[in-house]
Image (tube, rainbow, N blue to C red):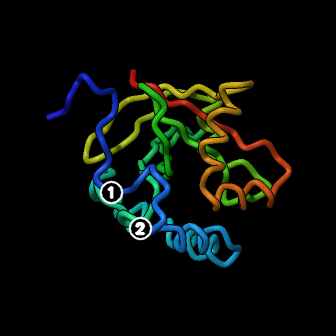
Amino acid sequence: MTDMSQPFPDGHWGREDISPLFKPVYAFASTAMGSRVIKALVPLDRRVLRATKGKYTLFGPTSMPELLLTTTGRKSGQQRVAALSYLRDSDRLLVLGSNFGAQRHPAWSLNLIADPKAVVAINGIDIPVTATLLTGPDAQSGLQRFLAYPMYQAYRTRTDRELRLFALERR
């Protein structure tokens, strides 16, 4: 049963605080090799998240909170699923299109710009959301929160493109 007083349930695994216990994990994730390893594991992680509707992740409690984001492909019209880390921001969730610091924006961000209606799966629950691309001070504030994690600092140095930040609000 869902607690309707809270727009999004708490995730089963993942931590939003930067625990000293997990600093070595974040340090590894910040390296080019760490990014390659994590990127290679993302398809498997997406399967775990899909099978559990966002309840469990391959990365367990050492990761940031994760969700599954289902968007509509802007070209294909097909449902596309991405596993993403997120941060809470009051009654909404923030997701950042870092794409591990690649030069291209992640496909899911292009899909949200074309159609902001999506679905997130968190802790076994599917929730319809509307995405808003953040700009200005709102985007800067959210970006600073992600940059508190060393891997996002590293991603930002690998590309000169602007990292897109989206707020997801329950529909």
* Location of mark 1 (residue): 13
112 relative to 26, above or below? above
Q: Quadrant of residue 21?
A: bottom left
Residue placed at 71% from the left, 25% from the top?
A: 137
Q: Position of residue 97 (x, y in %)?
A: 64, 46
* Location of mark 2 (residue): 59
What label does residue 71 carry, if any? Answer: none
Q: Position of residue 160 (x, y in %)?
A: 86, 50
How many other residues sit within 10 Å of disc 1, few (<14), some (14-19) or many (≥20)? many
Q: Position of residue 153 (x, y in %)?
A: 71, 56
Camera-nearest residue between 39 and 51:
39
Q: What amino acid does circle 2 point to?
A: Phe
Q: Quadrant of residue 63?
A: bottom left
Circle nearer the N terminus (2, 1) = 1
Q: Is residue 10 left or right of residue 136?
A: left
Q: Furthest residue to the left? A: 1
Instruction: Name the quadrant of the C terminus.
Output: top left
Q: Which secondary structure lies at badge 2?
A: loop
Residue placed at 43% from the left, 69% from the top?
A: 44
Whether label 2 touches label 1, CB < 8 Å: yes
